[in-house]
Amino acid sequence: MKKTIILLALVLFAFTLFSDVANRDKPLNGVWDLKATKVWEIKELEGNPIGSPIMTVSDNEELIVFERKLGKNFIIGFDGKLKTTFGPRGQGPGEIANEGLIFTAGNKPVVYEFPSRLHYFSDTGKFIEVKTINLNIIPYYFLDDYSYISAPPPGRQKPQIKYVNLK
C-alpha cells in the first residue's frame, strides 16, 4: 500500500512538472501583466479641473463626458482632443436643467434629464429633439435611437426589466 501511494505521488509530481499550462492568459494566482500604457489623459476641460464627470463611450469610440461643475457635455475624440461641447445647463432648446445620466444611441449622445425627459443630440453635438418619458421607465441601455432597456434602481419592490420603444 505504501509503495502504491509513493508511486502515485511520484507520477503526479512528474505529471505536474512536465505538463504545459492550458490557460496562459488566466494564471492561477490571478496576476497579469497586461503591459498597459497610457495613450492620453485629460486633467481639465476649458481650463477647469475635472471634478465629478459622468461618462460613456459612443459606437465610434468617442468619449462623451458630462462635467457637473461646468454644467456642460463634451465630446472627446479617440485621440483625446476635445471635439465639441453641447447641452449646457439651462432651460432653452438644447439646454438641460437637471442632467442625470448620459447614454449613446449609436454615435449620438442622449441625455436623461430628471425627472422625465430625453434630450437627443447629433454626433457633432447639435440639438435634435426632446422626448418626454414615463418617470418609472428610466433608460438603462439604448438599443437604437428610440428604443431602450429600462431597469429600476436597486431596492425597488417588484423590479422589472422593460423594453421601451418611443416611436
Image: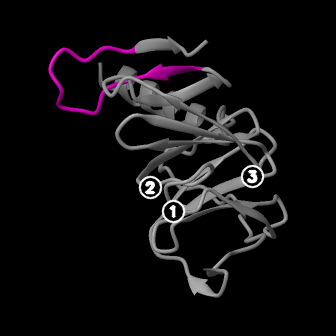
- Of the numbered discs 2 and 1, the one sitting upstream in the chain is 1
Three-letter amino acid code at disc 2? Answer: Ala
Q: Nearer the viewer, residue 92 or 55?
A: 92
Which residues lie in the magenta part? Answer: 147-161
Marks 2 and 1 close (CB-CB < 8 Å): yes
**Residue 55 in the image: x percent, y percent?**
56, 54
Q: Residue at x 18, y 14 (%)?
A: 158
Q: Which residue is mark 1?
A: 89
Measured along the vertical axis of the image, is residue 40 above or below residue 33? Answer: below
The location of residue 108, given as percent across then percent down, is 72, 39
Which of the labelled discs sits on residue 97, or is there none?
2
Looking at this view, is 14 or 154 the one in front?
154
Whether residue 90 is situated above or below residue 157 in the rendered picture: below
- Counting residues from the start of the chain, the first of labels 3 and 1 encountered is 1
Q: Quadrant of residue 48?
A: bottom right
The residue that appears at 77% across and 63% down in the rendered structure is 84
- The answer to whether residue 157 is magenta is yes
Q: Report helix, strand or loop for mark 3.
A: loop
Whichever of labels 3 and 2 marks the residue nearer the N terminus, that label is 2
- Measure how far apart labels 3 and 1 are at the Cα level: 14 Å
Q: Residue at x 46, y 36 (%)?
A: 117
Q: Nearer the viewer, mark 3 or mark 2?
A: 2
Q: Residue at x 85, y 65 (%)?
A: 79
**Which residue is identified by label 3?**
125
Secondary structure under the numbered disc 1 in the rendered image: loop
